Amino acid sequence: MQHRVGLFLLVSVLFTSVAAAEQWPSNNILFRVLFIKVGTNYGRAFTLERGGKQYLVTARHMVDKLPRQGATVEIYTQEGSWKKFTGDLIFPDKDDIDIAVFTLPRELTTRLEVGVGAGVTIGQEGYFFGYPYGLHTDFNGGYVAFVKSISVSAITKRPNATPFLYLDGFNNPGFSGGPVAFYNYQAQRWDIVAVISGFQPEKARKKVGSTYVYTDTLVNSGIVIAHFIQPALDALDKYIAQQK
């Protein structure tokens, strides 16, 4: 009887731990997500460490008009104000990957453990992070990102394009450039796997008489598009090697 009670308690603890891991995204990711500004355009980005330094990752379409060297990005820092930073931009080898890496002169967020570049499976549930319409959580005078849930609907590629993710979720304006995270059960940690690019639009319909007809207005279909982060990591590793 004692063995059965002990086994029940062990299973209960394990189940609770797994459920908690599945349910709550890690603060190690949440507190890395930053609010940025390029000219008059607002965006999202997040920090990661590579080669002993901290870098900023965002969507390529946020910064693709900036110079590769000496680019300027404004970041809402933990000090509670907008500050300008100048650095280099690093892009994946293929232009269709909507990710960019920005070099930083100093670290902007605390180094908290996070994995990057792990794989995912169809149906796997996770989270993505950002500042929809500039909204945020106030925390000690700073901005803390929104968190929204997603699941992997498909891993696909268009002709002559790089594979990317279709996610089931709702991507409001303000999430592009934010991280997509899934729990890595093997490593027992949350991993940043992809970066939000946008959403798949669909034509809105209106009722005419007793039927619905399509209009030319495009609306959010609820299908989120995200790009795998690994090609950006490969480009960053190449950049780091060239600086030595």
Image (cartoon, rainbow, N blue to C red):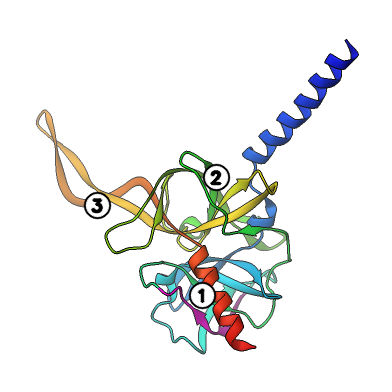
Q: Quadrant of residue 53?
A: bottom right
The residue carrying pointer 2 sits among few (fewer than 14), some (14 to 19) or many (20 or more) residues within 10 Å by Cα, namely many
**Marks 1 and 3: which is nearer the front?**
1
Left or right of residue 193: residue 11? right
Of 219 and 235, which appears nearest the observer? Answer: 235
Residue kind at label 1, given as amino acid type: Ala
Element type where label 2 sits in the image: strand
Residue neighbourhood size for the residue with mark 3, other residues' Cα within 10 Å, grouped as few (<14), some (14–19), many (≥20): few
Q: Position of residue 196 (x, y in %)?
A: 46, 58
Q: Is residue 215 left or right of residue 192?
A: left
Q: Which range is magenta?
A: 82-93
Q: Which of 154/195 is in front?
A: 154
Find residue 235 and name its label.
Answer: 1
- Residue 162 position within the rendered picture, expressed as x and y whole percent measured from the top left: 37, 62
Q: Is residue 131 left or right of residue 112?
A: left
Q: Which mark is residue 126?
A: 2
**Residue 59 sits inside the magenta stretch:** no
**Disc 3 designates what residue?**
218
Label whose residue precedes the other's in the sequence (1 or 3): 3
Q: Residue furthest left?
A: 209
- The answer to whether residue 89 is magenta is yes
Residue 241 place in picture, x, y as percent: 60, 83
* Mark 3: amino acid: Leu
Q: Is residue 23 above or below residue 210?
A: below
